[in-house]
Image: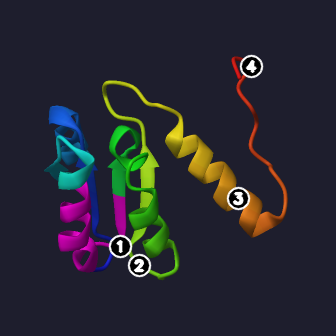
Amino acid sequence: MKGRMAIIGDGDGALVFRAAGMDAYRADTAAEAKTLLKKIAGEYQVIFVTDLLAADMENEIAAYAREAYPIVLSVPSVRGGNGYGEKLLRKCSERALGMDILPRSKSK
């Protein structure tokens, strides 16, 4: 499992990540993504989930946060994002450091 990364993404956009050496799994719905995450969790150290799917998988992602591996991270998809990944990163950094260290975008 050393250094293995994967992405679960909506549509064909996740396939772009194959160029970076990641295994890519397509899920068109959060339910499909949940099933995939459970199936592949033991095979990877880091699993990215596009935030359009991840927003509806908060409980599943939180369950993996209590374990050393896999690390499950939310990233924007090729079609754009919904801000869920940034929200999750901000929440985790606040929990770990006790304060918000991430800059806020001017549009928020």
Which residue does the image show at 61% across and 44% down from the upper left?
Answer: 87
Where is mark 4, residue-wise?
Answer: 106
Q: CA distance from mark 1 to mark 4?
A: 34 Å
Could one spot residue 22 in this view of the protein? no
Q: Is residue 91 magenta?
A: no
Q: CA distance from mark 3 to mark 2?
A: 18 Å
Q: CA distance from mark 4 to mark 3?
A: 20 Å
Type of amino acid at the residue the image marks with label 3:
Ser
Q: Residues within 10 Å of mark 1 (few under 14, many from 20)?
A: some
Q: Secondary structure at mark 2?
A: loop
Type of amino acid at the residue the image marks with label 1:
Gln
Where is mark 3, residue-wise?
Answer: 93
Where is mark 1, residue-wise?
Answer: 45
Residue 33, image x, y percentages: 23, 54
Which residue does the image show at 67% across and 55% down from the upper left?
Answer: 91
Q: Earlier in the sequence, mark 1 or mark 4?
A: 1
Q: Secondary structure at mark 4?
A: loop
Q: Is residue 92 left or right of residue 10?
A: right
Where is mark 2, residue-wise?
Answer: 69
Q: Quadrant of residue 93?
A: bottom right
